[in-house]
Amino acid sequence: MPRARLLAFLAGDPPEHPPGAIDRRTFNLLGLRLPALATAALLLVSLFLLLDRTHDVLPRFGPLDPRSLRNQAIERFVLFGMVPLALLLAVREDPRRYGLRIGDARRGLILLGVLSAVTLPVIVLAARLPEVRDWYAPSMSTAGDVTLSNALDLVPAEFLIRGFLLFALLRVVGPLGVVIAIVPFAFTHIGKPDLEMLSTLGGGLVFGWLNWRTGSIWYSGIYHVLVQTTVIVAAAGWAAGG
């Protein structure tokens, strides 16, 4: 693809996310005139992330034990996925306005393929670093089990941060919402290997841009699952001397 066509494909004809009546509603908080829906989304996402960080409903068997990761994924499926979806339905909002749709499938699938081809080999090599290898190798069980746990965990997380929150922000503050959504995403990685934690600034921007561009969470969700599964499987392989 020629350079001009590539730039046009990536940046040309930007999507519009016009606000609806519910997005324009405001409330006054001691003189602060705030958008009601976007403010509620930001506060709820912060609350859900804090609850996830501080409370375990299902048992844990060690922080990196595959059984712990599966139980964590089930909890996040409910807290990050089902609860915000129920809240949207309760206020009669169409979930498709928050990324639960196919969106621009052609652009999404092409970008997903390009991102995967470029980054997954790098992730395999990065998994050889002792800090990354030692963190992720204990999470390995089978490739299918790891993929399922990651899907239950990361797709709802994408919906919470870059669906429920991001699209509410986009209709109030415009593309700046993509940058704002990086903040809670970065906080969820505190305590992980430094390389991964710092990469969330760039990775969060890429994921958010992809959702903004396609109008959907599914392409970033699939890519996030591919990344996480690749690093776990590769780390386990390096730890085993493979």
Image (cartoon, helix red, strand yellow):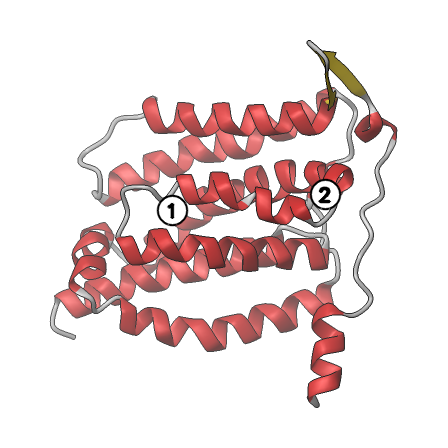
- Identify which residue is drawn at 33% across, 34% down: 71
Kindly tell me whether residue 86 is visible in this rendering.
no
Q: Nearer the viewer, residue 195 or 103?
A: 195
Q: Is residue 105 above or below residue 187?
A: below
Q: Residue 216 at what x, y percent from top left?
A: 68, 52
| Label 1 SS | helix
Image-based side of 189 in relation to 2, left or right: left
Amino acid under label 1?
A: Ser
Q: Is residue 209 above or below residue 178?
A: below
Q: In which quadrant of the rendered view does residue 95 lie?
A: top right
- Identify which residue is drawn at 75% across, 13% down: 28
Q: Residue 188 at what x, y percent from top left?
A: 40, 40
Amino acid under label 2?
A: Leu
Mark 1 and mark 2: Cα distance apart in space: 30 Å
Q: Pointer 1: what residue?
A: 149
Q: Is residue 148 above or below residue 97?
A: below
Label placed on residue 170: 2
Q: Is residue 40 above or below residue 187?
A: above
Residue placed farthest to the right in the image?
21
| Label 2 SS | helix
